[in-house]
Image (cartoon, helix red, strand yellow):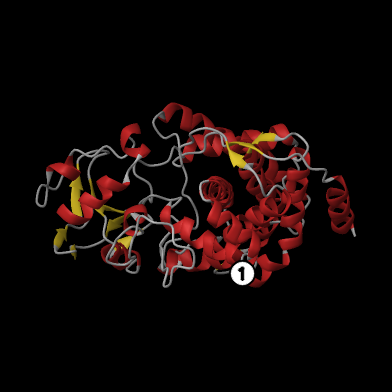
Amino acid sequence: MSSSGKCPLTADWQPYDPSFRKDPFPIYERFRSECPVGWVDAHDGFWAVSRYEDVFRVALDPETFCSSKGIAIPPMEYDGRALPMESDPPEHTALRSILARELSRKAVAAREPMLRGAARRLLAELSEAGAADFSEQFAKLLPTTVICKLLGIEGDAAQMRDLQEWTEEIVYERKDAASARRASDSIVAFFNELIPHRRENPGSDFISRLLAAEVDGAPLSPRQVMDFCWFLLIAGLDNTAFTIRNLLLQISASDALRERLIREPARIAEAVEEVLRLYSPVWGIARTATRDAEVGGQPIAAGERVMMLFASADRDGEQFPEPDRFVLGREPNRHLAFGVGKHRCLGLHLARLEIRVAVEEVLRHLPDYRVAGEVDWNGMGPLPVTYTPRAMRSVAARTRSSNSS
């Protein structure tokens, strides 16, 4: 355990303490001011890096700060590796290239009709009720529907709900290791049934692409295929749902923002970027020092872990004027919600499209929705809303007809 550079503020920090998670930003501000690179005793010790400039530097130096020794503190309850994230070049480069074309900006744009149709079908099911839980019945279901489509999963509503709940347990509920382990094992069991079937019946989905891929002339091992599938599911669900939920919450709290986005829907893309900055869906990612280094004037010894606090960096006033305020059209807005450098999120184009389309369709079809009661932003809990009931059967029918043709 390192001792140099300790300060009480970070040394005693408990990252998963409920009181901290409820409102982390005052603590992050103190981190940046008092100990921007501070040692944390929890979880066997690591360095918390909180300033934008320092986080940016660590992220851009994979040779000094590697990913292959784990990206989560504490580690996720999974016996394999979260591929391609938990790998380093040149392996990382080769693994990432397998799905790079399928997740390119152009390929993702071609999937917009499918995604928009899914959003409309979900809203059609809610439109006449006058009230709904937009978290459970929309924000979570849309990314689940999309990732299941991309992975070739043809489960029913109960199956999709299971996948979402398992992912949520692993990503957001990390207080109970036993529950997270059961959820992770359930995902592994699910893919252990699906992958052999897909090997015998290949299609155009992502799993079939992984099974057909080669790296250095050799196919991926069964372990690598499982690791890739496990991480694709985890990465494709909660973070996108979290941001859809938060942007809908942000709009509900501001009549001016709602009216602006309804009047100028092209600006919804700007709102997506700003809510990603303001409420980073990934609060931090870990790296391990491969050699002695220095970050923000603090020596880091080889083998020590660092946590890049994206949620803190994206509220750094040195980079973002008025960092705690939602500013539509903030420019520049070089937020780190998707990371930066070689490990920048492979699915960022898909995530941006899902969030934008989700909000466009809500404002088009249920524009007067209002969040009912006090709702926390930091989590995946309910988002109860009320709205004027509307009939969308004709819209849903046209969407189904368009998709089938």
Q: Is residue 64 above or below residue 222?
A: below
Q: Which residue is denoted by mark 1 in the rendering?
A: 104
Residue appearing at x 57%, y 48% in the figure: 248
Of residues 321 and 64, the one drawn nearer to the viewer in this rendering: 321
Taking the spot 41% from the left edge, 30% from the top edge, the residue there is 177
- Residue 138: image quadrant is top right
Q: Where residue 358 sits in the image (x, y, percent)?
A: 65, 53
Element type at mark 1:
loop
> Image check: 2 left or right of 353?
left
Report whether 125 appears left or right of 42.
right
Looking at the image, which residue is at 61% across and 44% down?
A: 139
Residue 44 rendering spot, x and y as whole percentages: 24, 40
Measured as percent of width and height from the top left, residue 125 is found at 77, 39
Residue 262 sits above or below residue 18 on the image? below
Residue 346 visible in the displayed image: no
On the question of residue 110 being in view, the answer is yes
Q: Nearer the viewer, residue 175 or 215?
A: 175
**Rendering quarter of residue 388:** top right
Q: Is residue 249 above or below residue 211?
A: above
Say above or below: 58 vs 137: below
> What residue type is disc 1 on?
Ser
Percent x, y for residue 396?
A: 83, 49
